[in-house]
Image: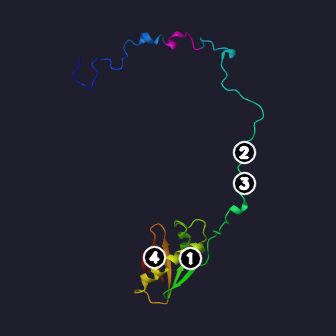
Amino acid sequence: MSDDPVLPPDDDPLGIEGSEELAGPDPVEAAPGPFAAEPPELDELAPIAEAVTGQLSPPPSPAPRPAAARPPRPDLASRREPLYRECRGYRLRLDPPDLARLRELPGSRGKTDDEIGEAFFDGQAERLAASIVDDVPSPSEIRVVVDPYSRQAFLALENRIRGILSF
């Protein structure tokens, strides 16, 4: 007997010894050939599945929505010309690719590019212009480059970034 508390005290931990008598003869050894056992008759087999025939009523169809309940689909075609906003002597410009990037912002689903751009300018134009007032002389045209993932707007004058603003 072992003194180790983890190991079982006997040498047959799974109880395999002496189980041959309980299991009975090996069915492979008892059969003299591969086809010695005859298959059961078809009458002896239980049916696997039964088919029921007859008329069943079709499932009810969902009620159609009235046409008046559906809102009109917005025109989501991409815009071809920039969107402008005048503010503090600056002409802020959102080009079509930047308007398309604004679609990634929350709350823009189902709106047109014009609506999204106007809403962006409504909330951010003053802040955008105020961030460059000391650095860029007015009147100037400023391109607003939008990164919706970092939620930043880059203000570019010609080919140079003149300001970065988080929104």
For residue 71, what is the image quadrant?
bottom right
> What's drawn in magenta, residue-wise?
26-34
Q: Residue at label 1?
A: 118
Q: Nearer the viewer, mark 2 or mark 4?
A: 2
Q: Residue at label 2?
A: 60
* Separation of residues labelled 2 and 4 (CA atoms): 56 Å
Q: Is residue 43 above or below residue 85?
A: above
Sequence-wise, which precedes: disc 1 or disc 2? 2
Q: Determine if the magenta segment contains residue 28.
A: yes
**Left or right of 77 in this view: 94:** left
Q: Nearer the viewer, mark 1 or mark 4?
A: 1
The amino acid sitting under disc 4 is: Phe
Dot 3 lies on which element? loop
State the image coordinates of residue 10 (x, y, percent, origin top left).
Answer: 29, 17
Sequence-wise, which precedes: disc 1 or disc 4? 1
The amino acid sitting under disc 1 is: Glu
* Separation of residues labelled 1 and 4 (CA atoms): 17 Å
Label 2 crowd bin: few (<14), some (14–19), many (20+), radius 10 Å: few
Q: Nearer the viewer, mark 1 or mark 2?
A: 2
Say if mark 3 contacts mark 1, CB within 8 Å.
Answer: no
Mark yes or no: residue 159 visible.
no
* Separation of residues labelled 3 and 2 (CA atoms): 12 Å
Q: Is residue 39 above or below residue 84?
A: above
Q: Residue at label 3?
A: 64
Q: Residue at label 4?
A: 154
